[in-house]
Image: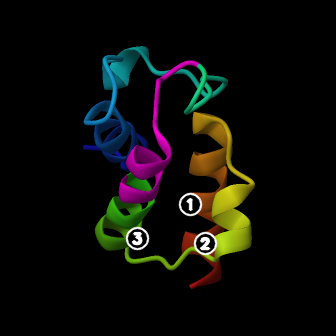
Amino acid sequence: MSREMKFKTIIAQYCEVLPEKMKGDLRFREDLGFSSLDFMSFLGELEDEFDVELEIEQATSISTVGEALELLNELDMAS
């Protein structure tokens, strides 16, 4: 499974959109229906699955699937 598909599979646990149908411009709250708790749980899963550490400022700036994936890739390259 590709890194992007793993990422989208984690998101799909919190919404009703299939990973293969997920587009980068989908917004977590407005389009996917994430609550604040869902979003924080999702970020924790990302940290565990991809062995990265998110700063609060980074996490609060994320609003779309594409932004989250971009940040994940940046963190991975920095480590």
Check disc 2 and give the amino acid type. Leu
Q: Mark 1 and mark 2 in contact (Cβ < 8 Å)?
A: yes
For the point 64% across and 81% down, the residue is 78
Decide if residue 63 is on the left or right side of residue 1.
right
Q: Residues within 10 Å of mark 1 (few under 14, many from 20)?
A: many
Confirm whether the magenta stretch covers residue 26: no
The residue under label 1 is 72
Q: Quadrant of the C terminus?
A: bottom right
For the point 56% across and 18% down, the residue is 31
**Where residue 57 appears, x then y in whole percent?**
74, 70
Find residue 14 and report its image quarter. Answer: top left
The residue under label 2 is 75
Mark closer to the observer (3, 2): 3
The residue under label 3 is 47
Mark closer to the observer (3, 1): 3
- CA separation in Å, label 3 and label 1: 9 Å
Q: Quadrant of the N terminus?
A: top left
